[in-house]
Amino acid sequence: MLLVSPRVRAAALALAVAATATPSAAQQQAAARSPGGGWLVPPAPIPQIVDAPPTPTLMVAPGERTVALLGRASLPPVRELAEPWLSLAGYRVNPRTNGWNAARMSFVNAITLQAVDGGARREVRLPAGARVAYPRWSPNGQQLAFANFTDTGIELWVADARTGAARRLLPAVLNAAFGSPFRWAPDGQSLLALRVPAGRGPAPEKGRVPDGPVIQENSGRAAPLRTQQDLLASPHDERLFDHYFTAQMVRVPLAGAAVNVGRPAVIRDFDPSPDGRYILVTRLKRPYSYLVEAERFPTEIEVADARGTPVKRIVDRPLAENLPAAFDAVVTGPRQVQWRSDAPATLAWAEAQDGGDPNAKVAVHDRVYLQDAPFTAAPRRLADLDQRYGDVEWGRGDFALVTTRWFNTRRQKRLVVRPDAPGEPRLLSDRGAQDRYGDPGTPVTTTNARGRQVILFTPDGGGMYLAGLGASQRGDYPFLDRMSIAGGKSTRLWQAEDPYYETVVEVLSPDGSRILTRRESQREPPNYFIRTLPGGQAVAVTRFADPAPQLAGITRQLVTYRRADGVQLSGTLYLPAGYDPRRDGRLPVLMWAYPTEFRDASTAGQVQGSPNRFSRPSGISHLFLLTQGYAVFDNPTMPIVGEGDREPNDSYVEQLVASAQAAVDKVVEMGVGDRDRIGVGGHSYGAFMTANLLAHSDLFRAGIARSGAYNRTLTPFGFQSEQRTYWQATEIYTKMSPFTYANRINEPILLIHGEMDDNSGTFPVQSERMYAALKGNGATARYVVLPYEAHAYRARENTLHTLAEMVRWMDRYVKNAGARQAQRTATTTGN
């Protein structure tokens, strides 16, 4: 399904050309009035900050001797998003490259190598105009492989860690339709890659005369599917899916020619065994579906030998269109098939024991199996689980950790299992999955000799390490613990301290005495440090500068307060640089939020965030309003709590308004906010929240709603964390939909939506119909459609335009709105 028409493409390219010149104030005002519009540019210093190069990210090589600093490109121009792409089974593929379209990619444009403890840097010599993606270290840490996107295809490159010299292994033939198109072999001397089959030929053309109607049929079986976008829609789409997603696996040695492995197929995933003798291959096959994404197409999972010859079929699963609607519903048969990381060639998978239906009353919902090469003996049971299998952290023969979950109760368990001698699992922890304060941390892993992630044990083998966020009523203070694997007792080795927010990136020594951290504060940008424990000083590995010195001096404060029913709330209050309350008085405020559902009030009231984070906005961040004299109350928590037999959404509107009321009261009580000059905004579910708050309260002067869904009857089989269907909870769906109450929205609302939104439920028609309802009821509203954008906005022109719209809306209807009564009078008189 080609989604870029010549007319739309030509219009976007014309706009891109026009955007190369900064419009004058008069031009901006004319564009704001014109239905056709044009690119707007926000006031300084926002464009300068948006265009600043992003801070590099860091990748540690196996062995912890070398790191790669990855420099990223700034925002792409809209002409890159305007490249043609195909919408196929939940994916968006650029037919020129056979990879994802630009809206879903963030390319690397520079790679620098250095020792993990600092020292001289080596620049990787990339090809001119490189657009790098999917960087992967070899298991021995001596080579860094990456894909390079060109105008005509995707190349495979490799760089030497010692010299930085890079060379091309494959020309522009990689097939990245499903994502990352290569994997390292365990010995680090070759890679497995997916390429376009030789002699594939041109893509199927769509005939002018159809073969017949598109027909779908159901034989009485319920298929309660959530709304999805980018699905197949015709026999021609099916042919295109086969054309672009069919790949040939090849083995690419570091020295020598590539060799075919197996036969061409629609290969969704592939993974060599840790010893390199086998390959686990996941293939999709017909019949395809027009109702679900590719992940639920008929699936074969097979073990092949190193040449691609089939050895053992593990899964032959039919089309999965008829799963129950509950979140814990799963397919029957083996699923989440993977290699055991700490063994040469052992498979692990889970199988539902309840028919895939979590509502079934059974003691065991999932069973985890193991099967060793050569896969002729019957699988052996690793563990029976009373919840859904989540994942497993492999360690060694007598210790691995299985995580389970149950959505309805929001519970999570961590179980100790013995892979070499399975028996009854030992419960290590059982907690609320949303309980941030009680989170014991995540096991620290290391890369073993075969390039696999395994649990890092203490030198005596009796302990492991856990790293976590350290959530508390004071905020997040990340930590590193050592835990006894026998009794489960943890000892704190290190924890971040004021004024820093510092997280553990790597544990560099088995005894835990050297760690690599990422540290920042309100005044210091994020950088990487090595710490020697206990008590050693932090030694800088990087010295990245402030990417936006124009914002130096802004302040942030973690604020706690309570709503009327006693639930504790929190948020982060940002103040502009140089703000003096006695001199400047109360400020106009933008509150930006996103509601979350909880099963109990205690976890709903836990503090989120840290007072010590470095604050530099990027992209379409609402924090750019700080440069224009606004205070920003960021993420004031909006918990929607359902306890006992009550679902959270049974009282969604009441709880939402109560949370917003408490947030408004708090910023006013602090002497920062002006009650008559507060706006509200949000993205996606936050946009849904914004429209509801304007419909059901008079707390705010105006709203900004980006890429939202407003009519829940258009998502009838569930949305967000709601599992009930429209027909099971008709009143809830109706009451929660701000579309139902569009006639009550009497404050100005700005609607912004990506023209090609790819998110489940937030189809662009949601904003289109909401705007029509608002206009039909005489509301003050503006509707902006961003060309080529998906759910998250990427193009530079669209980013600047979005920020300009937000500043303009807030200036007009919040900062300079005047007294409430005067505004109401002006509205009723038609001014």
Image (cartoon, rainbow, N blue to C red):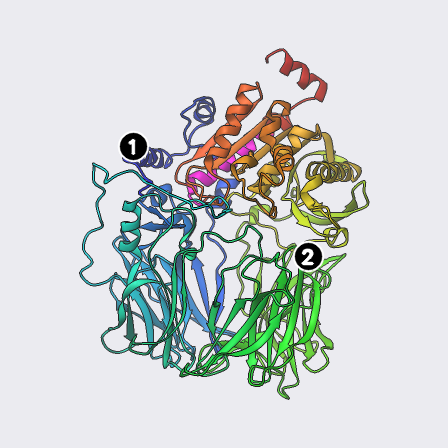
Is residue 347 rendered to the left or right of residue 441?
A: left
> Where in the figure is residue 562, as x and y percent of width and height?
79, 45
In the rendered view of the protein, which quadrant contains the N terminus?
Answer: top left
* Marks 1/2: CA–CA distance: 50 Å
What residue lies at 59% left-to-right and 37% top-to-bottom? 688
Look at the image and give the residue range highlighted in magenta: 794-810
What residue lies at 69% left-to-right and 46% top-to-bottom? 647
| Element under disc 2 | loop
* Amino acid type assigned to the residue bearing label 2 in the image: Thr
Q: Where is 553 relative to 664, above or below?
A: below
Which residue position is annotated with label 2?
409
* Quadrant housing residue 708: top right
Residue extending farthest bottom: 460
> Where in the figure is residue 374, as x and y percent of width and height?
40, 83
Q: Which mark is residue 7?
A: 1
> Where in the figure is residue 260, as x and y percent of width and height?
25, 72
Q: Where is 26 relative to 467, above or below?
A: above
Most prominent secondary structure in the magenta stretch?
Answer: helix
In the rendered view of the protein, which quadrant contains the C terminus?
Answer: top right
* Amino acid type assigned to the residue bearing label 1 in the image: Arg
Marks 1 and 2, the one that precedes in the sequence: 1
| Residue nearest the viewer, comparing 343 with 122 | 343
Residue 575 visible, this angle: no
Is residue 447 rendered to the left or right of residue 124?
A: right
Is residue 499 rendered to the left or right of residue 529?
A: right
Q: Where is 94 relative to 284, above or below?
A: above
